[in-house]
Structure formats: structure tokens, C-alpha cells
Image (tube, helix red, strand yellow):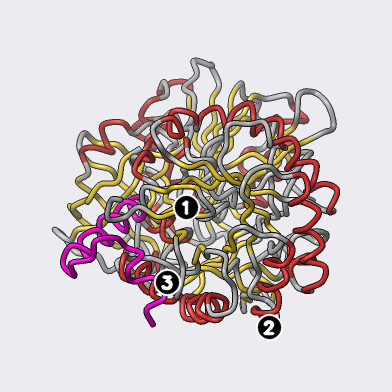
Amino acid sequence: MSRLEVSLAGVKLRNPVMPASGTFGSGYEMSEVMNIHRLGAVVTKGVSMEPWLGNPTPRVAETTSGMLNSIGLQNSGIEELIKIDIKSLQEYRQKGGVVIVNLAGHTIQEYIQVAERLNSESIDMMELNISCPNVKEGGAAFGTDPSVAEKVVREVKKVCTKPLIVKLTPNVTDIVSIAKAVEAGGADVISLINTLMGARIDIEKRQFVLAKKYGGLSGPAIKPVALRMVHQVAQNVKVPIIGLGGIITAEDAIEFIMAGATAVAVGTATFNNVNALENIIDGINTWCENHNIGNIMEIKGVV
Amino acid sequence: MIREVAKVVSNNECTSDVYELKLLVPGIAKDAKVGQFVNVYCKNQVNLLPRPISISEINGDELVLLCRAVGVGTNEFRDLKENDEIVIMGPVGHGFTICNEQRIALVGGGIGIAPLVELAKLLPKESTSVYLGIGKKEEVGFIKEELFRKECMGVKVATMDGTYGTKGTVMDILGDEIFDMIYACGPLPMLKALKKYVDKNNIKAEFSLEERMGCGGLGTCLSCVCKIKVGDSEKWEYKKVCSYGPVVDAKEVLFDE
């Protein structure tokens, strides 16, 4: 086993670093400016059965050490994703990359349909997004009540033939109860955190900056919250965790692994620097070398 | 598109809040086309998102950016000094298409004048007229009137307060003139008025749009969308300003009322 290799529900990743869904397109858009073949996994933007229009603009606002977004899961639907995006990732996959497709839905039935449609496609894992704060139905509505979350996961798990990652929202009173519920429902991996609900106001215009008023806060501003939640969840579930929320540097990523994550996802950092993911991979490798770590999992959950 | 460290050649104050940044950035300048933009990154890592800024001029290895200080990022860039270094990514997006029409108008409002400067150099002088709208006389400092006069047939200026040129908006100086092609960049109310004008008179036009962006033109974040008509129907879809635009066909774009 090489130094950075990790395993998520039986799926081997050459390193624990992947983009966060919705910040990386479907990967091929990024090939122009970086080498995506270095990534442990690629996570595509959220996909629903039918195309979704998304929210009105402005959809994005910068905040101190972070940003708010309110995209509303705009996507061209599952058929388009299969035809274009998944196809374009096959070279990456054949060279050992792991392809993860993020699933969106307004109803349990829609999640099931998307999962069923993807079963026969050349992908490795699915990520169930029950945590998007920017859509009215579906999204976080499923991720804030433990019994509802467990039910969604159980129903999707019945049809899904790939390992299933469930992505959690931090906008809850007790993250541990949600995590335990999705584990009970059959989640193979848990990823957390999605964005924190927030807002910004333009004081000259006396109105919210985002068209939808509230949006999801990401970036270094939320890292301490994410790290605390990853640690809490890691203490209480057996399934592996993908930690995310404000990771900018290799040191940030190592913190998440020490808190109990097996892998990490990087989102907002890529907007600041298109080489962020590669820099983080190199940085983790160097840190391990300097600390005589044979495999990165030696430091998992050491705190 | 590449990420490159640019060297500041000069940074000149044009008005109290507009400055002209000349950057030595050979890799990006080599590929840059009229109407494209670049991302400028803040040194202060508290401000994570790139600032998308129109390319105003392309001069060999150098790019000229005409910027208005409107927030933390553009305030930071205002303080850049000769020989400072700054990270840039670009060039981004689809720019203007050069035409051979007989009667061409360049219509710029406020800092939206920026991308029209390079365009003026590329269009036939005898066919091109320029219409610029600004708030007040002080803003004459950034509108490059002399350059436009050299490169084009004529220049008309409107000021909102009437302290320079004609009092009113750029629509008031366009009057009843008929054009074959209009290129425009400026604030949304100007583009909305111009859209009605070109639709009514069936004039070909290209608008350079502005929208808040996240990823800086890779097309990965889906923040910067605009409404684009689907075929001849009433239907529309959201397209990314960063990659489908920033320059769009005026007939295709839809603005909210």
C-alpha cells in the first residue's frame, strides 16, 4: 500500500483528496488548468432525473474568509450527465481514478430513479445529497430529521448497487443523531459538512446580496465547525467519513484526518487557486515523509 | 486559460475611484482576444474569490485593465505599485466578433467603457461611432475620449448631471440614428434600454455582461448565469456568463423587468 492510498467502503483511492460536489463541474472542465489524473476521486455536480433551472442571480457572494452560494442545483439532468460528463471521465477512471456521482432529488422517488439509472454506468460510487440548503423540496429537508434521513437512505440503498455515500448538512441541532440514522439506514460512507446557512446584506441597497436571501456558507470560515462535527461523528459511527468544510491547505486536510476522516473533499479553495487540490496532495505527501508515516491512515482519528 | 504571475508596469489614477492597471503578463496576453476578461486574485487571503475584470487593451505582452474601486478587492488592486506582482488567470470567455458593417456604434456606460477600447482599435475607423455615458464631468478622466477620437469617426458623451457633453443617458445621444451593428457594455439599466432599442429597430448587437462569479470562468460553479432564449420560442435557459459570454448576442439575452 502506498503512502497516500486509502479505502472507502472497499473502493481504493490512490490518495484521500477529491473535489467537493458542485465546485468542480464534472472534472473535464478543470482539465484545461490542472491534471485531474492526480485526484483520488472526482465528485460530479449534483444531478437530478430531469434538468433543473436553478435559482435567480446573484447566486454568489463573498464573505470574510468564505463565500455564500445559492445555485439551486442547476443541472441538465441524468441523461445529459451520462452522455457527456460520465463519458468524459472514463479516461480518468481507466487510469485508476474513482468516479463519484452526486445525486439530487425533490422526492425519495426521484433519488431512487437517479440511482437506478446510474447502476449500470461506469462509475464507482454515488453520493446522496440530503443536505443542499438552496432547494425548497428535497435537499436539506431530508437531512435535518433523523427518521426521514434514515428512510431516504434505506430506500435508495435498496436499489443502489454501488457503495453509497450520504452527505450531511450541518444545519441541525444534533449531527450525531443524523449520522447514526443514516448509518442505520445503510450508508456505506458519510460525508460532512455541506454548507452552513448564512446571509449578507448590501447596506446601500438595503437588500440581501443573494437573490434568494440566504445561501450556503463555505470556505475557511466554517472549518472549525466542520472539524468539530467530523470528530463528533467519527466517535459515534463505524462507517468511513469524507471530511470537508473550508480545507485550503494540506495542513487543513491532515487536521480532518486526525479528527477521524478517511478522505477529504476540497471546494471553495479551488475557486481561489486552481492548483489547490494538487498542492494539498503534494503537501500531505511531504508531511507524511517528514513524519515517517508509512500510510496516511496511521494518523486517522489520533486526536 | 492559464494562471500567471503578472508584473505591474504602471497603475495610474484616472479619477477618484477609477484606475488604469498595466500588467506585464505575456502568457495570457498572447492568447487574449477583444472582449475577454481575466481573473485578478487578492493578496489578502480573507478575500478568496477572483475578481473578473474586462481586458481593456491588449498591447503585446501587456494587458490594460480599467478598474473601478467598488469593494475590498478592487480597493486592494488600486494600491498596487510598479513592479508589484499579482496572480492573474485568463484569458476567459467569448469576446466580441469583429464585423464589416457600414454603420457601427460602440455604446459604453460608466466603467463598461473598458472593453470597448480595444474594440475601437480593431473596427474600421470610417464606420464606427462612439457613444459614452457617464455620471459627471470628473469621470471624463477614464473614458479615453482622445483614443476613441483617433480610432473612430466620432465620439459623443452624455453626463447624467449635464456637466459635460449632453445631459442625459447614452440613449439620449443615440437619438434616432440607425446602425447595422451595436457593441455595448455598461450598467444593466443601459443594456435593458438598448435591448429594447435594438429589438425594435432590428439592429444586430453584442452586449458584454457582468455577473458575480465564483470559480472565475472555468464554468464549474454555475454562479454567473444569464437568461438566454432557446431557439425562437418563448423558452429560456440559464447560461454561464463566464463561458457562454461575457459577450452575448443581444437578441438571445433576456433581462428581468
Magenta highlight range: A275-303
Asked if the residues shown at circle 1 and circle 3 are in contact, with their CB atoms under 8 angstroms apart, the answer is: no
Residue pointed to by mark 2: A174
In-image side of B61 versus A204 (left or right): left
| Residue at image coords 29%, 67% | B43
Q: Could you tell me if residue B131 is visible in this image?
A: no
Does the stretch in magenta take in A283?
A: yes
Determine if marks 1 and 3 fall on one subunit.
yes
Closest to the camera, between mark 1 and mark 2, is: 2
Tell me, for residue A302, which label it has, or none.
none
Residue pointed to by mark 1: A19
User: Which residue is at the front of the view, B26 or A261?
Assistant: A261
| Residue at image coords 37%, 64% | B15
Q: Is residue B214 above or below residue B25?
A: below
User: Which residue is at the front of the view, B104 or A262?
Assistant: A262
Find the distance from the CA under tag 1 to the CA under tag 2.
26 Å
Find the distance from the CA under tag 1 to the CA under tag 3.
15 Å
- Residue B96 position, x and y percent, is 48, 30
- Residue A274 position, x and y percent, is 37, 50
The part of the image, by quadrant, that contains residue A175 is bottom right
Tell me, for residue A256, which label it has, or none.
3
In-image side of A122 versus A184 (left or right): left
Determine if marks 1 and 2 fall on one subunit.
yes
